[in-house]
């Protein structure tokens, strides 16, 4: 019995989960994508409890085996970025040939094994750590393309914003989950190693569920009903499971370049908050270590809330056209955050609560990106969204190289004046992206025809 026959037989299925398979796929996909991101960031939160030297700048205290310098930490981050860059294009090809069920499961298992092996690699030394961070980056190379495939095959046109907002929130979800879990495990009798083991177990479990439940198209899912299938496909036309990507047409399309330019500014901001937010709060504003950690997690949580709200609003606002809505959401996300980045650089330590308020405003405003360039990418690219979003992942890797280099070159003394330069650079990047947003609104209706519409 094939998938279509099963779906027909289940047309009369009743219960709280009838005609709700797409929502289970949405939450399962979001959890799996977030678990790969969590596996990557858990090391950033365990550095403080792995080492034995409280003051890295004190030459009289001998370094322990897990006391990593900032330079060494940068090498670990760059190894991860290289892994993602190397894997992004191969994963795109594998997705196109085999679909997301098997390929994303493979990526999840790579992340699970690498995370579980990280404590052993820490014992083995520098190059073992480089290797395991590389493979964590390889698995991350599958994330953005998976988002595109889930949206294309499982989201109705009316729910594009909701799907994009939740699936693209993996960065926020991973920080919200990992920071308190890793913190409590580090302070427990189990020690810092348990943080990696717990993450590996959760990751492995989620991807086993993914392999069991997910299907590459709704048509093949045994629990799919005709009612839900009609909702998913309404006004979308047919979408082939495996279709060659018009790479040249996409790479020369001005809408896609506007999306990628906007993504670069937002991803630079996001990487800065995650990588250097705790450092800025602790060393410049003198917040305690525990407060600094939570003051990074709380803005990320608010970002997640605003992201989901913006996605829902983008779907349900009917009195504005899609191009107008995208322009408005992109303007809110990029311009407001850029302005507050400029303000942040001039807030002195004596008014550190105002600085925290500025960070909260930045995170909340950038939550509107789901109704902006993310939605534009999926609406224009349609069945090729996975390719467009995989290029955003490439941009994220580029930002992962640039951000540590930027801080390393500018913040040599760790003064507020040096950090101010970094904030101004980010502010200019974000505000400059508003021209890309206006460009999206202008060319959306004239250049969307390069992809198939049935």
Image (cartoon, helix red, strand yellow):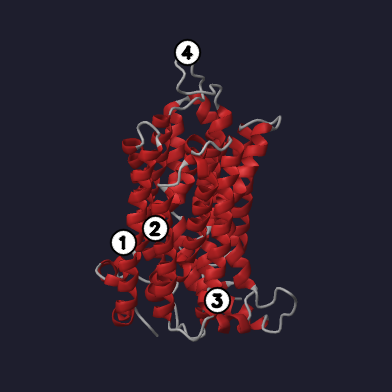
Image quarter of residue 302:
bottom right
Alpha-carbon distance for marks 3 and 1?
43 Å
Q: Of discs 3 and 1, which sits in the foreground?
A: 1
Q: Nearer the viewer, residue 441 or 379?
A: 441
Sequence-wise first label, 2 or 3? 3
Sequence-wise first label, 1 or 4? 4
Q: Residue at x 46, y 32 (%)?
A: 129
Mark drawn on residue 432: 1
Alpha-carbon distance for marks 2 and 3?
44 Å
Report whether residue 277 is seen: yes
| Percent coordinates x, y for residue 18 in the rendering | 69, 77
Please report contact status of discs 3 and 1: CB closer than 8 Å, yes or no: no
Q: Residue at x 29, y 82 (%)?
A: 446
Q: Residue at x 45, y 65 (%)?
A: 369
Mark drawn on residue 338: 2
Alpha-carbon distance for marks 4 and 2?
42 Å
Please report contact status of discs 2 and 1: CB closer than 8 Å, yes or no: yes
Alpha-carbon distance for marks 1 and 4?
47 Å
Please report contact status of discs 3 and 4: CB closer than 8 Å, yes or no: no
Which residue matches tag 3? 219
The kind of secondary structure element at disc 2 is helix
């Amino acid at each position: 019995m094939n998938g279509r026959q099963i779906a027909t037989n289940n047309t009369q299925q009743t219960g709280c989960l009838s005609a709700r398979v797409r929502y289970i796929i949405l939450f399962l996909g979001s959890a799996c994508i977030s678990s790969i991101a969590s596996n990557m960031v858990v090391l950033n939160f365990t550095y403080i409890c792995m080492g034995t030297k409280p003051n890295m700048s004190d030459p009289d205290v001998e370094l322990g085996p897990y006391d990593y310098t900032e330079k060494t930490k940068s090498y670990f981050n760059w190894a991860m970025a290289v892994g993602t860059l190397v894997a992004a294009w191969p994963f795109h090809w594998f997705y196109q040939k085999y679909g997301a069920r098997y390929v994303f499961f493979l990526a999840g298992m790579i992340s699970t094994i690498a995370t579980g092996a990280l404590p052993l690699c820490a014992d083995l030394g520098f190059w073992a750590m480089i290797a395991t961070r590389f493979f964590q980056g390889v698995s991350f190379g599958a994330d953005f393309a998976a988002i595109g495939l889930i949206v294309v095959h499982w989201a109705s046109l009316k729910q594009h914003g909701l799907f994009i907002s939740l699936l693209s929130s993996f960065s926020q979800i991973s920080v919200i989950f990992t920071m308190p879990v890793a913190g409590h495990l580090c302070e427990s009798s189990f020690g810092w190693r348990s943080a990696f083991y717990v993450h590996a177990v959760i990751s492995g479990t989620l991807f086993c569920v993914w392999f069991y439940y997910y299907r590459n198209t709704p048509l093949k899912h045994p629990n799919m009903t005709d009612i839900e299938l009609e909702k998913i496909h309404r006004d979308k036309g047919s979408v082939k499971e495996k279709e060659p990507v018009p790479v040249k047409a996409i790479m020369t399309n001005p809408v896609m370049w506007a999306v990628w330019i906007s993504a670069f500014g937002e991803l630079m901001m996001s990487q800065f908050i995650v990588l250097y937010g705790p450092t800025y709060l602790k060393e410049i504003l003198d917040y305690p270590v525990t407060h600094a950690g939570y003051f990074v997690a709380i803005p990320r949580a608010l970002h997640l809330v605003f992201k989901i709200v913006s996605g829902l609003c983008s779907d349900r606002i009917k009195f504005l056209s899609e191009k107008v809505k995208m322009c408005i959401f992109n303007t809110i996300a990029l311009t407001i955050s850029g302005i507050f980045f400029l303000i942040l650089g001039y807030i002195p330590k004596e008014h550190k609560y105002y600085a925290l308020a500025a960070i909260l405003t930045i995170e909340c405003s950038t939550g509107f990106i789901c109704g902006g360039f993310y939605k534009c990418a999926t609406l224009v690219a349609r069945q090729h969204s996975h390719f467009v979003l995989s290029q955003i992942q490439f941009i994220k890797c580029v930002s992962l190289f640039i951000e540590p280099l930027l801080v390393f070159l500018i913040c040599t003394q760790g003064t507020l004046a040096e950090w101010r330069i970094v904030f101004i650079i980010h502010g200019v990047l974000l505000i400059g992206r508003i021209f890309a947003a206006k460009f999206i609104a202008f060319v959306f209706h004239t250049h969307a025809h390069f992809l198939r519409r049935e």
